[in-house]
Amino acid sequence: MSEQKPKISYYLKLIYPFIKKDMGLLVFGLIAMLVTSALRLVDPLILALIIDKSIPNQDMTQMFRYGFMFIGVVLVSGLLSYLQIVLLSRLGIKIITKFKGEVFSHLLKLPIGWFDKKPVGELIARVESDSERVKVLFSELSITIIGNLLFFVGVFAVLMVRDWSTTIYIMPIILISIVMYSFVFRYITRFFRMIREKYAIISAKVTDYVQGMQMIQALNQQERVIDDLSYASKDKKRTEVKTSFIEYGFQSLFMFIFNVLFVVIVIMISAPKIIAGVATLGTLIVFIQYIYRMVWPLMHLSENFMQMQRSFVSLKRILELTELGTEDETFTGTKIPSFDSAIGFENVR
């Protein structure tokens, strides 16, 4: 019977003591995210008002009023985004620093025999690398995922109100593109895993060679060590080059689909309506602006979720260390060990 995986709520409950003192920063990040997501929906609508009302009526006063509103929305949105990133990054660094300290303090209390069974490189990776990966749980990435999901819902609602027939026509294509990209990213993910494994191999080799540098020099093994590291580095490089070629190739394809193909489809659908007076030019601008703003969030949505999953995997690896019994906990005897005999040397020359 397979072991049941702990739920996300289990991990969040364990790390809650590390974030409860800084809940204010987290709440501010959530509020800033909500406001920013709403403002991202507003400025294209202001442009539509300028095109549909101010320009046809030749009302310069109204145009300037909408223009100042547009500038204000952009400035407030940019300021909130900046504060959100800075404060949440600070929160992530603060929490992970405290988290690393707790993990290392627990390591100091573990039995000596346990360290004999664990490679140094693996422990360093768990305490340092895994902790850095957990940091995204408290940084802007988590807030960005929530914000993008709310933004997509808002976009769909606004477009349905502006032109429901065009929205119904293009939404299935967008959903199909998202599903296709998620499959592509899952395919690429295995290459990312291979890169991490090769990086771990290189890190382990470097750690072992640095620790055994005196022996390497004494036995004149410098050339063999260089060749070994060179081979491992080239192997990792080949995998990274192949991964980058596949990743950026598919990204370019999806950029073409969204930036060119979707815009052409929207124009072909909207142009007859605009000519017939059923739709407005401002509605076309809103559609195009929203499509451009959805490109990168849609393309990176699957990647962001994968990063979150990797963060929880790293969190599990770290928590496995904190759940190990300490030297005091594993000692179950009632009598403190004492040395009552003697060590003798006989016939020693």
Image: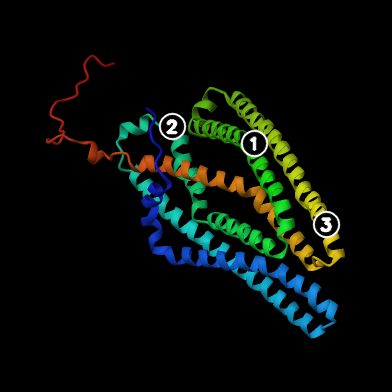
Q: Are the two marked residues, 2 and 1, in contact with CB atoms closer than 8 angstroms?
A: no
Q: Nearer the viewer, residue 97 or 69?
A: 69
Crowd rating for badge 3 (residues with CA inside 10 Å; few <14, some 14–19, many 20+)? some
Q: In the rendered image, which residue does mark 2 sit on?
A: 119
| Residue 60, position as x, y percentages in the image | 82, 83
- Residue 188's disc is 1
Q: How much space separates mark 3 and mark 1, taking CA atoms?
A: 33 Å
Question: Residue drawn 58% across and 56% down?
Answer: 149
Q: Nearer the viewer, residue 97 or 336?
A: 97
Q: In the rendered image, which residue does mark 3 sit on?
A: 267
Quadrant location of residue 185? top right
Q: Nearer the viewer, residue 160 or 311?
A: 160
SS for callout 3:
helix
Q: Note whether 49 is above or below 184 in the view shown.
A: below
Q: How much space separates mark 2 and mark 1, taking CA atoms?
A: 29 Å
Q: Note whether 326 is above or below 85 in the view shown.
A: above
| Residue 153, position as x, y percentages in the image | 61, 58
Question: Residue drawn 42% across and 49% down?
Answer: 100
Describe residue 129's horizontal placement relative to residue 289 as left or right: left
Instruction: Give the residue type that dot 2 points to.
Output: Pro
Q: Are the two marked residues, 3 and 1, in contact with CB atoms closer than 8 angstroms?
A: no
Q: Earlier in the sequence, mark 3 or mark 2?
A: 2
Q: How much space separates mark 3 and mark 2, taking CA atoms?
A: 61 Å
